[in-house]
Amino acid sequence: MRDMITLACPSCGGNLRVTEEIDRFACPYCSREHLVERSSGHVTLVPMVKQLDRIGTGVDRQSSEMAIRRLREDKRIVKRRIEEWSDELAFARARYKAKRGNAILQTVIAVCSAIPGVALCAMDDKSIPCGVLLLFTAFFCGLAGLVNFTHLPRFDRRVAIAKQKLDKFYHRLDDLDAEYDVHMRIVRRT
């Protein structure tokens, strides 16, 4: 007959019978797995969960170190994209302001040309050519101002799109920073 040793299950306290050939088994009472450790004539049971925790800790650390390298690269790319879209936003705002300024200036010139043009045309025959010239100037400046005013929504959309892209990249950077912090805590803990 084989030599049997009776030990208590470290998880539930149930009586277990262990033979010399057994190195690993599950408790019939709680179904937890255990390793049988033999050293210096002593036999002890070590729950598999502890062994797996040690292995898991090493795997977690290695996974986190790899994730940290990936996250650093991702953060670098997102920061570069933030710089690009910040420049795009500044450019779009400048274009919008320039178009709006041109539209306002052209409208003011049109009004300032139309009033004296009408007055000159009404005065005498000698003033009519100057009045007509001023009215043509008023017409074309007014038309240019109107065209610039109609283009303002397009430039305003460019500003809005640049803001949206920039916000999206800032949110992505926040997400990457949070994930990075989680992995750094795992690496420091292990």
Image (cartoon, rainbow, N blue to C red):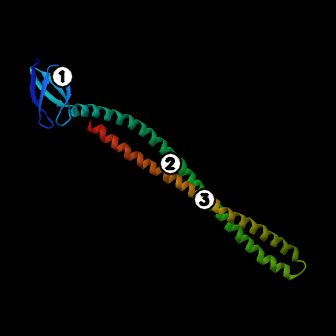
Q: Is residue 131 left or right of residue 67?
A: right
Q: Are marks 1 and 2 in contact (CB under 8 Å)?
A: no
Q: Are marks 2 and 3 in contact (CB under 8 Å)?
A: no
Mark 2 residue element: helix
Q: Which residue is mark 1?
A: 22
Give the farthest residue toward the bottom. Answer: 123
First-in-chain label (2 vs 3)? 2
Q: Amino acid at mark 2?
A: Ile
Question: Which residue is at 39% across, 37% downward?
Answer: 67
Decide: is 169 above or below 72: below
Q: Amino acid at mark 1?
A: Ile
Closest to the observer, 74 or 112:
74
Whole-percent x, y for residue 170 in the image: 46, 51
Q: Is residue 172 left or right of residue 37?
A: right
Give the farthest residue toward the top. Answer: 1
Mark 3 residue element: helix
Q: Which residue is mark 3?
A: 157
Q: Quadrant of the C terminus?
A: top left
Closest to the observer, 65 or 57:
57
Mark 1 residue element: loop
Label 2 crowd (10 A; few <14 / some 14-19 / many >=20): some
Q: Is residue 93 left or right of residue 27?
A: right
Question: Which residue is at 40% across, 36% downward?
Answer: 69
Q: Which residue is mark 2?
A: 82
